Image (cartoon, rainbow, N blue to C red):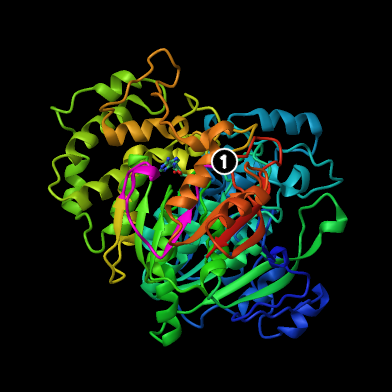
Amino acid sequence: MEMINYLARRKPAKSLLFSGNLVLDLEFKESETNESHGRFPLNGIQPFLKWAGGKRQLLPYLAKHIPASYGSYIEPFLGGGAMFFYLKPQRAILADLNEDLINCFTIVRDNVEPLIKALNKYVNDEDFYYRIREQESNGLSDIERAARTIYLNKTCYNGLYRVNKKGDFNVPFGRREKPTICEPKALFAAHRALQGSQLIHGDYQQVLKRYAKPGDFIYLDPPYYPAEGYADFKRYTKEFFYEEDHIELRNEVRRLIDRGCWVLLTNSNTEFVRNLYEGFSYEVLDARRSISCNPETRIGQDLIVMATKPAAKTPASIKLHSEQLLENFPGTRYMGSKYRVLPFIWECVKDLEFSSVLDAFAGSGCVAYMFKQRGKRVIANDFLKFSFCFSQALIENSNVTLTPAERDFLIQPNPDAGTFIANTFDGLYFTHDENRLLDSLRTNIEQLDNSYKKSLALAAMVRACLKRRPRGIFTFVGDRYNDGRRDMQLSLHEHFIENVAAFNRAVFDNGQKNQAYGLDIFDLEVEADLVYLDPPYFTLNADNDYTRRYHFVEGLVRQWQGLEIQYHTATRKFKSYETPFSKKETVGDAFDRLFKKFKNSIIVVSYSSNSLPDKGTLVSLLKKYKSRVQVHQVEHLYSFGNQNHKVGNNANRVNEFVFVAF
Ligand SMILES: C[S@@+](CC[C@H](N)C(=O)[O-])C[C@H]1O[C@@H](n2cnc3c(N)ncnc32)[C@H](O)[C@@H]1O
């Protein structure tokens, strides 16, 4: 057995070296900033709010990447607006998801004098602070509401903005000696700077879709990806930005560049973010953080600045485009998804000779998609029919997409659709209107006359349902765990529209005849040079039952035909499909049968260190049929939604193995 350890690939040490990327480790001290970038003095005006994550001290560095001329300036994660106030552009579109913030900017722009008058009444007193904090902001006039926002910002702890589950501001009193609550000079300066600005309360994607035009300059400063990843799932804020959101944002950046916009983005200097922006040029900066209780952590090399220009069609940009194919893949938080370890899987097999691949337990389909993108002939299989739809839509299908007219037809109410979903799942997962939409949609999809169009529509519908559900699963009913993130705010209808576009974008032709199947693996008779096996991971204390988690979307795709809904259960699930990978007594034998079945192919198996059978047993089983067995391993932190995760513990940090046998 050969043991290949990938642990060294984890977090790089302080001095950074990345192949193929321009990384400047500037390591500057604050006092050097103006000097070394004298061309970019801080000649703008001070933001009137003290905003956590504000970019004021980075401006000299960000300034280097500002284009000499541009159309509109767009900043859709506005916060305190440090960059905007630095630039003072003629035309700006400023947006944020925080309604109080946008109201405050609007009042500063339009009604600064009454605002100053109102602010003068506020005092720096703890009782007074908590009385103001308790107020319902939407019960106030817009001016009072803006004054309250400024007051809380100036007197709360460290200028933090944090809300609880209900969206109420919950930062404690700051106990600062003499905060300046009302700064007329700063407010008037901001008032003047804002005169040419449009202010929008909204989601960044919608703002960019609607307003970004070629030649515009867009500065993106999203909530940072946390340095420790998203291990702690108890946290919630309405502004919380999860991994998926960061991936979507990166995709958005690409779209903007393709449109010919200038884009500048800041995020944390983490492995995840660097991987996301691989292929872009970026700089690593040492930024001073102003928002930590612990002075030890105030300074850290934690920021990546990447700047891009409207892309010229150079060979490099063409290469980027081919890599984008995988990035287009509409991922979900599918239990056990290998999305994040795809580069590792590819590393393990890239030197082997093979031209066809069977992804035997395709799940979300991302591994099959990666192999398709690498030019292999791919066969994707999973016994779940909704997974089969994903594979049929994106693996087998190479050129069919849904037209806007078809999409619009699909979402039309259909009076003949019946009310099965609305009745059976009333009040469980979605609103009544959304259930009615699903009744119609599911019926309308049957009217499409092309099987690829059908599977595209079904896949878009399933992904819409998964995204609209807290945690993307159906093991509980109601809105528990709704953390207010963007996906929870969009309606099912909006999700469906977005997903039709997402699946359309992901369709591509790799010149091969690829196939999709929806069978139990032991019933599938196909041959491939390489067989990739990623069955449900069996552990003694965690549940690996895919049918139970995803019964609603599986039932929806099958229109519950041949499935017996268990009406006595709160979730209205149906009986889980049998699989030998879910029982201790059968899982070992199931692996043996699998290896035997595919003994003429290169066998590649994904499994994890806390699952059974253990590594040694799997190697022995593989050795029955194959002469060489390599074991590759990497430490992997499963994001939420994977089989070994329980909220509040860290058991989802495991070693991910890839066994390669040939
Ligand atoms: C670990 S997941 C695969 C994840 C996938 N590689 C991805 O990256 O999304 C395991 C999959 O095996 C499927 N499955 C379980 N038992 C099966 C069987 N007997 N035949 C076919 N598929 C099965 C489940 O439906 C599930 O989608």
Compared with 618, 196 (above or below) is: below
Is 564 included in the stretch rendered in magenta? no
On screen, 484 above or below 569? below
Label 1: few (<14), some or many (≥20) within 10 Å? some
The answer to whether 405 appears left or right of 490 in the picture is left
Residue at (54, 45) in percent of width and height = 98
User: Which is nearer the eye, 263 or 418?
Assistant: 418
Residue at image position (64%, 61%) is: 631
Residue 501 visible in rendering: no
Q: Quadrant of the N terminus?
A: bottom right
Determine whether 556 is above or below 511 in the image.
Answer: above
Q: Position of residue 534 (x, y in %)?
A: 50, 50
Amino acid at the residue labelled 1:
Gly
Question: Is residue 47 visible in this depiction of the protein?
Answer: yes
In the image, taking residue 418 as reference, residue 357 lies left or right, namely right
Count of marks, rendered view: 1
Q: Is residue 271 above or below residue 332?
A: below
Furthest residue in direction front, as rendered: 624
Q: Nearer the viewer, residue 662 or 406?
A: 662
Report the span colored magenta.
517-537
Q: Residue at x 84, y 47 (%)?
A: 178
Q: Name the residue at the top extreme.
A: 568
Q: Is residue 114 left or right of residue 195?
A: right
The quarter of the displayed image where residue 427 is located? top left
Question: x, y percentage for residue 538?
Answer: 58, 39
- Ligand 1: image quarter: top left
Residue at disc 1, secondary structure:
helix
Residue that badge 1 annotates: 588
Q: Is residue 523 magenta?
A: yes
